[in-house]
Image (cartoon, rainbow, N blue to C red):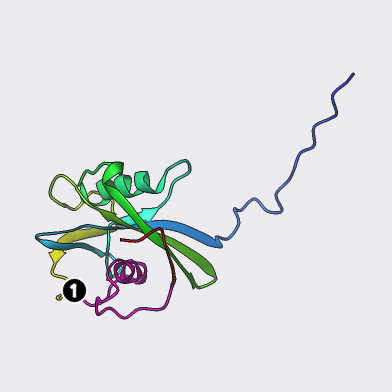
Amino acid sequence: MTPPARVSSRPRTPRPPVPQTALGVGAILHGPRGLLLGHHRHGTWELPGGMVEPGESMEETVVRELAEETGLTADPADVRLLGTLLDHVDGVVRITVAAEVTAWRGEPADQPGERVGDWRWYALDALPQELFVCSAQALTAWRPGLPIDHTPARFTSYGTR
């Protein structure tokens, strides 16, 4: 018996689709020196983080982004996923997983080719102005009492503290 002929598909255009969803992580590192924030070249202060790559777990994304942006190393076992933040900006649904990194090694330093640098430790009662919205949302999910104003996001916690 002859197998049926294969059917192919054809995209409508050669361009990829316009993004409708973005999935990323925000890594919260807080210790005796304070909270780690970096300055984006567009002027906002933000947590280390970025987009999830195909095949990565959220914990692996946090560890990779932390190393790429700051030079710090961590183990996936030291990443505690806090929950998912959902918002909608300019037609794109943003999904951000807030994560707390409980242990890391090294000193934060600017990394070649990265958009975020000038890494600094901040006291929670002396955070800089102009926080990146996703970072602000992650921080208030982590510590709801922080005096941070931001556009709303729906937060779904992954568990209790």
Q: Is residue 128 depicted above or below 25 in this figure?
A: below
Residue visible at 42% across and 44% down in the picture: 57
Query: Percent position (x, y) of residue 22?
Result: 48, 59
Magenta highlight on residue 112? no
Quadrant that contains the N terminus: top right
Residue visible at 30% across and 68% down in the picture: 42
34 or 54: nearer the viewer: 34
Q: Is residue 138 depicted above or below 114 in this figure?
A: below
Query: Percent position (x, y) of residue 65?
Result: 31, 49
> Is any atom of residue 97 visible in this view?
no
- Residue 155, by quadrant, is bottom left
Quadrant that contains the C terminus: bottom left
2 or 142: nearer the viewer: 142
Would residue 60 appear left or right of 9 to someone viewing this image? Answer: left
Judging by the rendered image, the residue that carries numbered circle 1 is: 127
The residue sitting at the right extreme is 1
- Residue 153, by quadrant, is bottom left
Residue visible at 46% across and 57% down in the picture: 23
128 or 142: nearer the viewer: 142
The three-letter code of the residue at mark 1 reads Leu
Query: Percent position (x, y) of residue 67?
Result: 25, 46
Segment colored magenta: 128-153
Magenta highlight on residue 147? yes
Q: Is residue 123 depicted above or below 25 in this figure?
A: below
Residue visible at 28% across and 70% down in the picture: 44
Would residue 96 appear left or right of 143 to someone viewing this image? Answer: right
**Mark 1: few, some, or many residues within 10 Å (few <14, many ≥20)?**
some
Q: Secondary structure at mark 1?
A: loop
Query: Percent position (x, y) of residue 73?
Result: 21, 43
The residue sitting at the front extreme is 160
Q: Main secondary structure of the magenta part?
A: loop
- Residue 148, by quadrant, is bottom left
